Amino acid sequence: MYQKIFEKYSPKKENLIYILHDIQDANPQNYVSEEAVQAVSEFLNISLSHIYGVLTFYTMYSTKPRGKNVVRLCESPPCFLKGSEKMLKKLREILGVRIGETSEDGLFTLELCACLGVCGNAPVMMINEDVYGDLTEEKLETIIAEIKGRS
Amino acid sequence: MKTLEELRKIREKAQQDMKLRESNTRIKIVVGMGTSGIAMGARDVMKALMEEIANRNLADVLVTQTGEKGLSSMEPVVDVIEEGKPTITYGNITADKARKIVAEHIVNGKVVNDFVVTAQS
Amino acid sequence: MSLKRTDILLCCGSGCVSAGALKVKQALIDELKKQGISEEINIIETGCMGPCDYGPVMMVYPEGVFYRKVSVDDVPEMVEEHFVKGRPLKRLMMQDANEKIFDQIKDIPFYKKQVKVALENCGFINPELIEEYIAVGGYEAIGKALTEYTPEETIEIVKKSGLRGRGGGGFPTGLKWQFGRASQDPVKYIICNGDEGDPGAFMDRSLLEGDPHRVLEGMMLAAYAIGAQKGFFYIRAEYPLAIRRIKNAIQQAHEFGLLGDNIFGTNFSFDAEVRTGAGAFVCGEETALIASIQGKRGEPTSKPPYPSTSGLWEKPTVVNNVETLANLSTIFNKGPEWFAGMGSETSKGTKVFALTGDLNNTGLVEVPMGVTLRELIFEVGGGIPNGRKFKAVQLGGPSGGCLTSEHLDTAIDYESLKAAGAMVGSGGIIVMDDSKCMVNIAKFFLEFSLDESCGKCTPCRVGLKQMHEILERITSGKGKEGDIEELERLGHTIKDTALCGLGQTAPNPVLSTIRYFRNEYESHIKYKSCEATICLPLMHFLIDQDTCIGCGLCSRKCPVSCITGSQKEKYKIDQTACVKCGNCAEVCPVHAVKRIPGTGYTKSDAKNGLYE
């Protein structure tokens, strides 16, 4: 099942981070499953504990299923100064979830993240690979509605 | 890339495509593209000028456009602006006349007096 | 030669993209098609032009017109008026406070004091076309270096320029290269550190996205100098556009024979690859970065050994920051003396800064070193908006310190800022106005460092947590005598004993705010009062009885029904029940609900039924 991904890389430890990224991106629930970890362990010939050590160290990986769209709201100081707390409140309201939870329809998971590097347009959030800046409560509603509409 | 010469040749060609962003042009040709200008055929004049300049590889000549010039009876109007010389305004220009302007004025430096409306400093 | 008569340079740095630039691009394409002039107009996506707050922005050549805050709705008028009729739209141009309009880029105050070296091509060229990079002089520097200088001479040129590491360390680049060259191992590596994680910093992202070939050329110069055959770009995973652009640049360089074997017909062979992070700020530290490339947890290791002796896979490795590399081609093309002619005595050249926070012109700027904070904040940055006053500026992100109005005339260079207790850092500058609480800000920065701590060493893992607990108590009204001194003691201990730069600098925001705003800490602890009314337990909402019109809207919006009153008797908040949600203040039509420092009542007041 992971053959397609493994074919792209040589079985060296240094490729672990990219293999995990690819596996996560290929999974519609945006996470790395136990089964996947087992497969990687065999392919790279490294211990499960090493892989879990890496998975739990880097914040972009998840070992639990998430929604189709991972909403990451920046909580770092420049965004905080520009009202990210208000955005968080609004997102919790629109999505009906708390931080770390996935919406009932399985479409969105809400997470907080560290600085995304788009501080000139604070407050900022990233949904999968798309960056949204200059956020306002109205914009949040439009963006989420647009994504819902596309699914 | 085997030599610096090779790189420089590529550079020269690439610079042509970015000419609009450079500020060192010898001659600027401005075509009046207001509504009346367009109605009288300024777009064709513009196209002819650009084609002629491209064909002749005139690297330091820029063609651009502007709004209503106010000389409605003379449209299409073309200004030729050269540093240190008075601006020449040509009127009632057609695509053919435009090509003549390029050949005689731009390349050979001879103002085509028959087409001139005013010469202002 | 093309028949295009207009170049529209549309800024598509992540900032403007996040503000909708790609939608504007599509609207332009559609409208130009509708008007039948698609053949005549070039739309070019460029990197960051700088004034992010005004995005989406664009420049139109040959007129040299600058447009800001362009929305999809503006496009039809813009195409009709400017591109068809030749009448640029004044309402989309930059204006100053007196409504003076700037139609030429060079007149805009934001750009006036800037000198673009690293950012020279950002916003001017299409970063996805190697031809455009070559057109503006790209790859000339490496070509010359390879054919006319030895690696040692290359190192001398960089030493002469005075270039210092732009990632924050400020270590002399030429010297670092010299150490790399000195190692005898035939296998060496050059790494470009693109793991920019400082909150408030986006200089590196903009360079990687906006001028990727420039960074690649810089890497090649470094590789030649130290004797490396392989280079790695380590870019954080949160920068997908930067990753794509660099990968694209590497591929194009290969196609043009600028990477691979015998470059420019010399013995120099070099190749580069991209490696990504996965969300860990600490990987910006060079030993953690190296661990990450090797597929491990990004935990730093002690130095010595330094990477230049034993780094990636135990080979000599030089790690250079993105901006450091981006300065190199100009240093070689214009000469090291030209570069050293700018800046101050100890800090040569220019520096890219990311201006964020309470500022009129937030965005990306590049100024000569030695410019004062006042010039940067008030002239380039346009000063503080909304009629508020300047309070403090944080430089260097979570590793840096804050400075106050007494420091506004300090020159921005490595030594001057260090003397004032701050640092240049990577270039992130966060400006704060008088509505902010410095204790709260310090807590925020500490939280960031705490979250990002790798956990390996005790001082950082445990020490920062203890500092955070104290700050939590202080900001929730439970601060006690001795807390400030304990914070200072902990802070200094952690600085002295932590394993890597993250831990060693994490206490800085707390220590510097204590140094310059001790009175705020004391007010929080002794008087349970937050002057800026930010720390909710240390402030209260009060309805001004003279202003109140008795409409009752506040009472209806109160989630805990603690506001009582009537049309005649006005309304009052029961402070003991109030949860400080702020709804009342938001809905009051006459702004009668005030934010007041202090809890609003003492314990004995509450006992005696006296509050408000």
Image: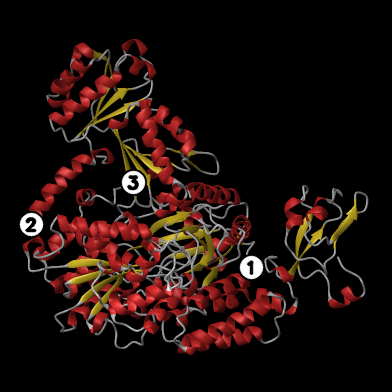
- Callout 3: few (<14), some (14-19), or many (20+) C-alpha neighbours within 10 Å? many
Name the residue carrying label 1: C437
Specify which label sits upstream in the sequence, 3 or 1: 3
Name the residue carrying label 2: B3
Specify whether C412 is left or right of B52: right
Q: Position of residue C280 (x, y in %)?
A: 42, 73
Q: CA distance from mark 2 to mark 1?
A: 60 Å
Q: Can the viewer see residue C105? A: yes
Q: Position of residue C339 (x, y in %)?
A: 27, 62
Q: Residue at x 29, y 48 (%)?
A: C126
Numbered badge on residue C568: none
Amino acid marked by disc 3: Glu
Q: Chain of mark 2?
A: B
Q: Position of residue B89 (x, y in %)?
A: 27, 19
Q: CA distance from mark 3 to mark 1?
A: 40 Å
| Circles 2 and 1 in contact, beta carbons < 8 Å | no
Specify whether C187 is left or right of A44: left
Q: Position of residue B102 (x, y in %)?
A: 17, 23
Amino acid marked by disc 1: Cys
Amino acid marked by disc 2: Thr
Name the residue carrying label 3: C45
Secondary structure, mark 1, is: loop
